[in-house]
Image (cartoon, coloured by chain):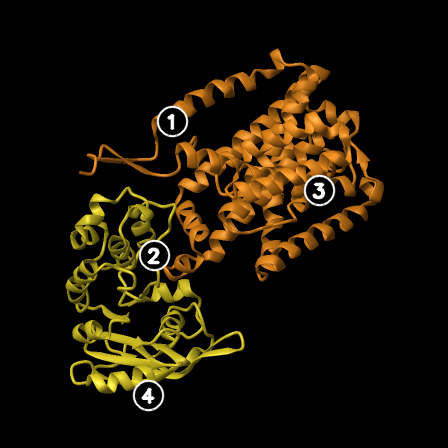
Amino acid sequence: MPEALLAIDGLDVFHGDFQALYGIAAEVAPGEMVAVIGANGAGKTTLLRAVAGLLGRRAAAIRWKGRPIGGMRADRVAALGIALVPEGRLLFPSLSIEENLLIGGRMGRRGPWDLAAVYRLFPILRERRGFAPAQLSGGQQQMAAIGRALMANPELILIDEISLGLAPVAIRQLYEVLPGIVGEGMAAVIVEQDTTRALAVTRRFYCLQEGRVALAGASGSVTREAIGRAYFGV
Amino acid sequence: MDVTRASRLTRAAAVAGLVLLVALAAAPWWAGRADMRLLGEIFLYMALATLWNLLAGYAGLVSVGQQAYVGLGGYLLFALTMLAGLPVLAALPVVLIAGAVVAVPVAALIFRLRGAYFAIGTWVIAEVFRLTAAQLSALGGGSGASLPPAVVRTLAEGRDLREAMAYWLAFGLLVLVLAAAVAILRSRHGLALTAIRDNELAARSLGIDIWRTKLFVYVAVGGLTALAGALIFLQKLRISPDAAFAVNDWTAFVIFIVVIGGIGTLEGPIIGTLVFFALRETMADLGTIYLIALGAVAIVVMLRAPDGLWGLIRARTGAELFPLSRRVTGIPPRP
């Protein structure tokens, strides 16, 4: 395995007095797609937010290309090349779709992604570029949120709850384009409730349970029973 | 298909605005002295409300201490003209810049605080300013000072021209503030500001430097609020620490105006100011009952129309007077 792009080791995160993550260890290699699965409240969103610089403070717990970045300010983390597609999309409701995309490209990182490239990937966004996010379907909003993150030309894209609340046809569309955008210098971590789908497109996975890594391994070789045990803790 | 910010209504508003601009600029020729004073006061409140709205409505900085800058501007004007001997018109740009300069260290201090603590912090700063002003014996200490006639005459010789100048300055400030607000919101900072207002978490994770964006707005608003303060006390001709740093006059009323007009919109503070003055001019004689009525109006608006009166109008009609949001034109209707 090549040297890790992102290496997490001994990550604890607290929400006030409540400990959400206990000594998480995980790695992402360049160009690799990794799934984070687990039940509601297992800590998946907390893990992504900690990587994005929105939570947590111990620097050495998260390393980016060997450099400690835990607790770094979110906008500086983003400038390093880590982009978050947050749970619930969180598009900016008073900006148009195109303005939402432009916001993502504000940092001026170089790379293949610009407005034209995002519109090639999701042609429907070009048609809807002047619309407010609320006028789009959930699937189109998720495309806009992914496009907004791609505009930053990240080396790692973190996609939280990629298919939550979306119609099956929209989910299928998103999973069709995913393999195409990963690779070529960009790795991805996807958080997903639908384990079957997540394991089908990723190389490796981490299954969280009550704030700990309950199971990790190669997505292709894990059994349904093992996942079930790790998922529910029975 | 084309993306534009203008609509038929924003263009009509631009034409009507131009006519209004000319009519108001010509007020010294058609309005009486009392009307001009009232209009001048309305303009200054509109400017204060627009500035507070930039802070709270766009940058999420809910300050209850903007009287710090109003008072600072007033005192700076008095100090620069009475003690340093500057003519009024030369002192005003100095006040603008000094207000912005003072805002930088203040921001470094209070930006460490969040939410309610930030609000209280701004108030504490204003109190510190007030107590400091009360120590300035050269400007009358706790009892304050009056602007000497010699200073006032540097504005203009005759009384009529002086009144007209004070009016034009207030009007000019309002135009400057509105233009600055539109310019800020249409700039790259504006896109970031709107994003921060909509969702701070998403904005941060997209690499927007929240701190720098907020600092930029806070400093610009600080300078312009100080300038407004200078013009307010140029109209009053008298200043004292309690009047200059009054939380009621320069912050509570301003918050009332922005909240009932519609926070986070440029139209809101303008409408709010008109409502506020309509209430004040008809009910101010009633004393305490007037303040109770203000409170009641605020409560009803917050419960019934949380987006303010302009929010209500916009929800009903989709109207927009300032060309800020973008829209697509020429799309074929959906099948």
Q: Would residue B266 be visible to someone looking at this image?
A: no
* Residue at image mark 3: B248
Chain letter for the yellow part: A
CA distance separating discs 3 and 1: 36 Å
* Residue at image mark 1: B9
Amino acid on which the number 1 mark rests in the picture: Leu
Which quadrant would the N terminus of chain A be assigned to in this image? bottom left
Q: Which mark is nearer the camera, 2 or 4?
A: 4
Chain letter for the orange part: B
Chain letter of disc 4 in the image:
A
Q: Position of residue A217 (x, y in %)?
A: 23, 85
Amino acid on which the number 4 mark rests in the picture: Val
CA distance separating discs 1 and 4: 63 Å
* Residue at image mark 4: A234
Amino acid on which the number 3 mark rests in the picture: Asn
Left or right: A153, with A71 as reference point:
left
Secondary structure, mark 2, is loop
Q: Which mark is nearer the camera, 1 or 2?
A: 1
> Label 4: few (<14), some or many (≥20) within 10 Å?
few
Secondary structure, mark 1, is helix
> Label 3: few (<14), some or many (≥20) within 10 Å?
few
Q: Position of residue B263 (x, y in %)?
A: 52, 42
Q: Quadrant of residue B155?
A: top right
In the image, what residue occupies the spot 36% across and 59% down? B206
CA distance separating discs 2 and 3: 42 Å
Amino acid on which the number 2 mark rests in the picture: Met
